[in-house]
Amino acid sequence: MRFRSRRRALAVPADRAGTAGPAAATGTLALAAANALVADGNLREAVRLLTDANRLVRDRHVEQRLVDLRFDAFRQSTWPTSRPLWPTDVDDLFPGVLIPEITRAELTVERVRSAINHHGSLIVRGMIDHERVDRLVGDIDRAIDAYDARAESADRPELAGWYEPFARDQISNRERKRFRGAIMTVESPPTMFDLIEAFEDVGVGQLLRDYFGETPMLLARKGTLRRMAHGGRTGGWHQDGAFMGVDIRSINIWLSLSHCGDDAPGLDVVGRRLDGLVQTGDGAFAAWATSPDAAEQAAAGAVVRPIFDPGDALIFDHLNLHRTAIDPEMVNDRYAIETWLFGPSTYDSMTTTLDEGYSPRDQLPIVF
């Protein structure tokens, strides 16, 4: 099944839309209408209404309200206790390769399922266009600058709304994330809006509805904006299932916004399917991570360092073994966005490592 792009004109960015006159009136009216829907229990419809309004005129208050509503809408929803049936016999459509590569035009649920089942991941070349890449790079710069301004108590009115702490998350170590060149996507409402619009343009929503057999949801604590310094510090080998649980159904869309993998930090990826967790701890950088020796043994010679161009994406799930690739000869920084989605019928299976103060379900699902 192929997915049509839903092309839209890019809305005026939040930092250029203004907050007075007709724009403010539009946002105020939309928020009032959304609040009426919320009062009637129609949170999903309120999300749709505010999304449509924000496409016409960007409003930072609308974008912040959308973040909150996405969280509340998930909590309002009820999900089936049984999981949709998945195909049990999936053909290998990419024999003889480690990590398959396709173009955006070739992106189908059959290719995604085949690549993950047999190779562990899939590269999609040119998944988003250059205009949206440029938009998202600028968004990340503003979001990180806004975080820094807030941390320094600096008065930067032009950055208003670009970083807003997600009050529902009382666990994440934001200072450590920022030290590593990252902040959570959910904490930059304008960036989150632009990212979801970019994914909808490609048809990600329908793609993953077909993949999961149900409506996909986002994981708020796992969505990450990255501006990785070429000499930055980061973690080592890991599988995200080690702290999300192995029984969930997940997809990560790792979106590169820079040329990387050779002269800028990229990813090292095990180019084969792993059916379970590799040994954790024992010399790894964290209790839930994998040591270099254990990773090398699990990879069995199948470690790949892909070269990405802006707009390329790597799609994988929680069993994929990978790490950020940084070498001394790299001289450029790298922009990327990591977005985790999952099938909500597996919500009860989500667990996290208790030794870091986490408890089950702390990845904070929100409506996509």
Image (cartoon, rainbow, N blue to C red):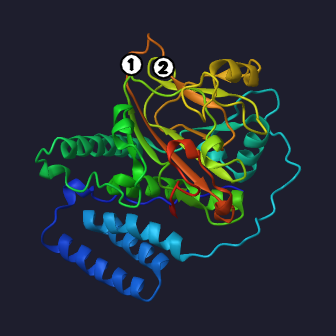
Residue 136 drawn at (x, y percent): 37, 45
Q: Residue drawn at (57%, 75%), measured in percent from left and top?
A: 77
Residue 63 drawn at (x, y percent): 33, 64
Which three-letter amino acid code belongs to the residue tagged 2? Ile
Q: Name the side, left or right, on which 363 lies relative to 98.
A: left
**In the picture, residue 96 is in which quadrant?**
top right
Q: Is residue 91 visible?
A: yes
Which of the two labelled residues, at mark 1 and mark 2, occupies the earlier sequence position? Answer: 1
Please name whichever residue, 53 or 63, is drawn nearer the observer in this view of the structure: 63
Q: Is residue 59 visible?
A: no
**In the picture, residue 46 is in which quadrant?**
bottom left
Q: Which mark is residue 284?
A: none
Query: Which residue sits furthest top?
Result: 329
Q: Name the side, left or right, on which 216 lies relative to 109.
A: left
Residue 77 vertical position relative to residue 305 in the rendered view, above or below: below
Q: Name the side, left or right, on which 119 lies relative to 197.
A: right
- The residue tagged 1 is 231
Residue 354 drawn at (x, y percent): 57, 46
**Cα separation between marks 1 and 2:** 7 Å
Q: Are marks 1 and 2 in contact (CB under 8 Å)?
A: yes
Secondary structure under the numbered disc 2 in the rendered image: loop
Q: Which mark is residue 326?
A: 2
Which three-letter amino acid code belongs to the residue tagged 1? Gly
Secondary structure under the numbered disc 1 in the rendered image: loop
Q: Residue drawn at (72%, 32%), measured in percent from left and top?
A: 278
Please name whichever residue, 290 or 309, is drawn nearer the observer in this view of the structure: 290
Q: How many marks?
A: 2
Query: Which residue sits furthest left?
Result: 155
Residue 35 vertical position relative to residue 289 in the rendered view, above or below: below
Residue 175 vertical position relative to residue 201 in the rendered view, above or below: above
Q: Residue drawn at (45%, 71%), measured in percent from left and top?
A: 72
Q: Residue drawn at (68%, 55%), measured in percent from left and top?
A: 2
